[in-house]
Amino acid sequence: MLTEAQVAEFHERGYLEVGRVMSDEHADIMRERLFEVMEDRSQRKAEANRNMLGDPNRVVIQIVNIWEADDLFREHLYNSVMCGIVSQVTDCDTLRVWHDQVQYKPPKVGGPTDWHQDHPYWPIIQPADLVSVWVALDDVDVENGCMWMVPGSHKWGAHKGGTIGTNSADFSPMPDLSQLPAGVDVTPVPMPVKKGHAGIHHCLTWHGSPPNRSDRGRPGIAVHYMPGYTRYEKDPAKTHLVEHNVEVEPGQVLKGKHFPTVMENGVVLSADNVK
């Protein structure tokens, strides 16, 4: 569980390194299972499994809803430490999963993930109160492309559809300053995460990760958690990869078998639960 000071730090900065959420041994097993799915050696398929950049010399392998392909990743959604932390920082005792996501950056050719906010890329859900838990399945640091964050940026609202702009020379954010409060500091800071540890961030926090030019890969898994009141909002002009899984009407709470309830009334449920 987080201390009051840690919760306050998250609300002030929009992100937080929260420490260990699994053993190194469990992280090693999950890493191997990740490669099984990524290399199409699993019995089932994820929602998506692709190189986001479409270039063999600049590779970011994105896997969406790996939990649908592997039961170990399904169990991961219900990690009691993770669910407890998200419940604390959202002050909500019911949580569901929007989706999970892997962005794997292989050695040498791992490409960038440009500066952005998450929620504007999720146009079919409201309000913007989601929190992501990103777990490192091996040590992730500046050398192999850890995420960088802009402290306090979650307080500045949605920015140009979520795209911040990226300076390729030094991988700094290039926002439209006219959209920002006067005098804000947009200096980014790294968020390294040790194997088996996690970092969390708000869905409006500016973040990105530079290329991985090291000899080490960057394996990790993010789970995007929704407070229990998150609604499905149909947008005729926009959609999302997982929208075809939605089984509720616009304006209703987003839930169902594709959006698992992992905590209800303060109790963490089990991976056998479909609710």
Image (tube, helix red, strand yellow):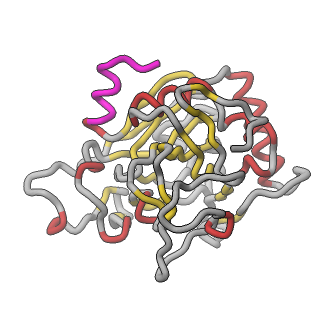
* Position of residue 271 in the picture relative to residue 111 (left or right): right
The front one of 10 and 183 is 10
Q: Residue furthest left?
A: 182
Q: Residue furthest bottom?
A: 237
Q: Horizontal and vertical percent for residue 147?
A: 45, 45
Q: Horizontal and vertical percent for residue 113?
A: 49, 58
* Position of residue 36 in the picture relative to residue 84 (left or right): right
Residue name at image x 22 percent, y 68 percent? 176
Q: Is residue 215 visible to the viewer in this orientation of the structure?
A: no
Viewport quadrant of the C terminus: top right
Q: Quadrant of residue 140?
A: top right
* Position of residue 198 in the picture relative to residue 177 (left or right): right
Q: Is residue 275 visible to the viewer in this orientation of the structure?
A: yes
Q: Is 10 part of what is drawn in magenta? A: yes
- Please, is residue 116 above or below residue 107 in the view? below
Residue name at image x 8 percent, y 57 percent? 182
Q: Horizontal and vertical percent for residue 64?
A: 66, 56
The front one of 140 and 152 is 152
Q: Quadrant of residue 258?
A: bottom right
Residue name at image x 39 percent, y 55 percent? 127
Looking at the rendering, the stretch of residues picked out in magenta corresponds to 1-11
* Position of residue 265 in the picture relative to residue 17 (left or right): right
Q: Horizontal and vertical percent for residue 163?
A: 37, 67
